[in-house]
């Protein structure tokens, strides 16, 4: 008879419990792994693509339009990252402000990759991005305000305003604001302890990639866009390069201040010459093409709407009407006003547009005066002046002189009361007497010629004793 061992039963129970615990642990490993992966997935960026947007042109209205369109596309695609590939000498400050604001408000993460130089307005754009990466040998800074000729503008208000804008952009990511000020204002003195240098008065600050990294104006160094993407941990994402379309490139070219003014000069001069000295066709067509390019560029850039184009067309129609409809100048004044409103409404900046329009108008007036003088015989004013000459070489026979009839005699062919017909030396002529009636058949003598009138007088018979 086999007796049961109570210790054995107790050991068997522990083994069973150990086995069940081990099963629970083994079963829980996959579940724990799944939970871990889920937590990791929640912490990683969205699985969107990386968008690369080039900033390789002068900072002006065309670039602002392109960047806005590119950022919208990236936002709609829920991109994981937007890389702004910057290599620009700078440009217009008001445009840079708009671009900076658009980057700050972007619904996707942004990185500025300085692949060439981020000078002036380019530095401001870079500072507004979430991070800054720079390629070795590149620079950032030199944001001093200059005019179109490249001369420094020392207006204290403008310098102070732009310095505050740069400071605000630098402080977005905790960068030293004094460095931002020194990039704008050369009158300051700045000691850069991180690199052991002092930037004295009269010098404008520009940082190389290596120095920018040491002073906190770059977050990493990278040779390529791919290295920037790898630095952000997104090497596995699809990279989409966005570039300006052909229309945007044309818009960028024609909306630059110099080209826009040139188009206005050609447009005004061409249309005016065609109106004043008609018949050529080429000036009018050239003028219309110039205005078409002007409004095309402004429209693609998002500034010119249909209302500005309609106003411009109305202005042209009113000016043409003034040439043919007497209105005491009212139609002309309304036409000029419509043109000005149409052109300025379709521009990025009203003040700049008015200045360009004024310069264009002055130069166009000189061109028009020269052209009108050279072709003065074909001017529209000839339509209102009787300049046609009835000369012999054109087939017209001039009126013969009637002075030869003075003193000659003839016979009245009709009664002169006081005008009538007379035969003078064998020719029938319309004549007029000196005031008295002359009977038919009476002899007459030509006394004078007054224009087209031949004045005759009856010859009285002389009675002699």
Image (cartoon, rainbow, N blue to C red):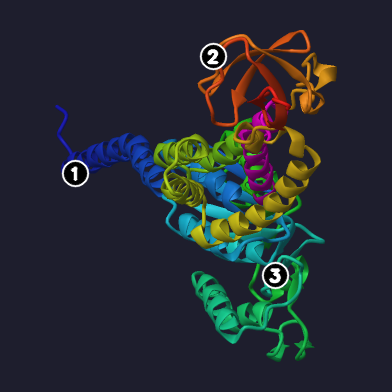
Q: What is the secondary structure assignment of the residue under circle 3?
A: loop
Separation of marks 2 and 3 at Cα, in angstroms: 93 Å
Q: Is residue 279 magenta?
A: yes
Q: Residues within 10 Å of mark 1 (few under 14, many from 20)?
A: few
Viewer-proximal residue among 262 and 237: 262
Badge 2 or badge 3: first in the primary sequence: 3
Q: Position of residue 97 (x, y in %)?
A: 52, 63
Q: Nearer the viewer, residue 28 or 21?
A: 28
Secondary structure under tag 1 reads helix
For the residue pair 99 and 197, the one nearer the viewer reads as 99
Where does the magenta region start and end?
261-289
| Residue 456 vertical placement versus 179 (above, below) | above
Q: Tell which circle, 1 or 3, labels the residue nearer the N-terminal end.
A: 1
Mark 1 → mark 3, Cα distance in angstroms: 95 Å
- Viewer-nearest of labels 2 and 3? 2
* Residue 240 seen by the camera: no
Q: Which residue is label 3 attached to? A: 147
Q: CA distance from mark 1 to mark 2?
A: 172 Å
Residue 69 locus on image (x, y percent): 50, 41
Classify residue 383 by image quadrant: top right
Q: Nearer the viewer, mark 1 or mark 2?
A: 2
Image side of residue 415 versus residue 120, left or right: left
Q: Is residue 363 placed above or below 269 in the rendered structure?
A: below
Q: Does the magenta stretch mainly form a helix, a strand or a loop?
A: helix
């Amino acid at each position: 008879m086999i007796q049961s061992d109570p210790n054995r039963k107790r050991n068997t129970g522990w083994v069973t419990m150990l086995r069940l615990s081990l099963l629970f642990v083994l079963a829980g490993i996959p579940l724990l792994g799944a939970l871990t992966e889920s937590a990791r997935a929640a912490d990683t960026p969205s699985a969107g693509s990386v968008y690369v947007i080039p900033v390789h042109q002068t900072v002006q209205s065309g670039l602002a339009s392109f960047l806005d369109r590119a950022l919208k596309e990236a936002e709609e695609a829920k991109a994981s990252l937007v890389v702004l590939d910057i290599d620009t000498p700078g440009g217009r400050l008001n445009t840079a402000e708009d671009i900076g604001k658009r980057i700050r408000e972007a619904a996707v993460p942004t990185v500025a990759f300085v692949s060439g130089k981020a000078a002036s307005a380019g530095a401001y754009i870079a500072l507004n991005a979430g991070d800054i990466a720079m390629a070795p040998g590149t620079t950032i800074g030199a944001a001093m305000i200059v005019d179109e000729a490249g001369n420094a503008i020392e207006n204290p208000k403008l310098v102070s305003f732009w310095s505050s804008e740069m400071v605000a952009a630098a402080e977005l990511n905790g960068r030293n604001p004094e460095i931002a000020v020194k990039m704008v204002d050369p009158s300051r003195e700045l000691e850069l302890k991180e690199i052991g240098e002092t930037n004295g008065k009269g010098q404008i600050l520009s940082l190389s990639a290596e120095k920018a990294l040491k002073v906190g104006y770059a977050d990493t160094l990278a040779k390529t866009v791919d290295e920037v993407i790898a630095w952000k941990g997104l090497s596995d994402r699809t990279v989409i390069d966005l570039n300006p379309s052909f229309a945007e490139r044309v818009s960028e070219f024609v909306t630059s201040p110099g080209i826009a003014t040139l188009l206005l000069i050609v447009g005004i001069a061409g249309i005016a010459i065609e109106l004043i000295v008609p018949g050529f066709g080429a000036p009018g067509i050239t003028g219309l093409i110039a205005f078409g390019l002007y409004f095309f560029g402004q429209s693609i850039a998002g500034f010119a709407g249909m209302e500005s184009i309609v106003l411009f067309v109305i202005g042209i129609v009113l000016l043409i009407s003034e040439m043919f409809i007497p209105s005491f100048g009212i139609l002309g004044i309304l036409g000029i006003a419509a043109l000005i409103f149409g052109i300025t409404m379709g521009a990025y900046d009203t003040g700049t547009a008015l200045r360009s329009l004024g310069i264009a108008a002055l130069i166009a007036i000189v061109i028009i005066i020269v052209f009108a003088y050279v072709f003065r015989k074909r001017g529209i004013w000839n339509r209102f002046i009787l300049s046609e000459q009835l000369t012999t070489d054109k087939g017209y026979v001039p009126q013969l002189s009637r002075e030869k009839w003075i003193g000659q005699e003839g016979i009245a062919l009709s009664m002169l009361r006081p005008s009538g017909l007379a035969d003078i030396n064998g020719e029938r002529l319309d004549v007029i007497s000196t005031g008295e009636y002359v009977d038919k058949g009476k002899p007459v003598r030509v006394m004078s010629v007054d224009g087209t009138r031949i004045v005759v007088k009856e010859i009285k018979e002389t009675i002699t004793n």
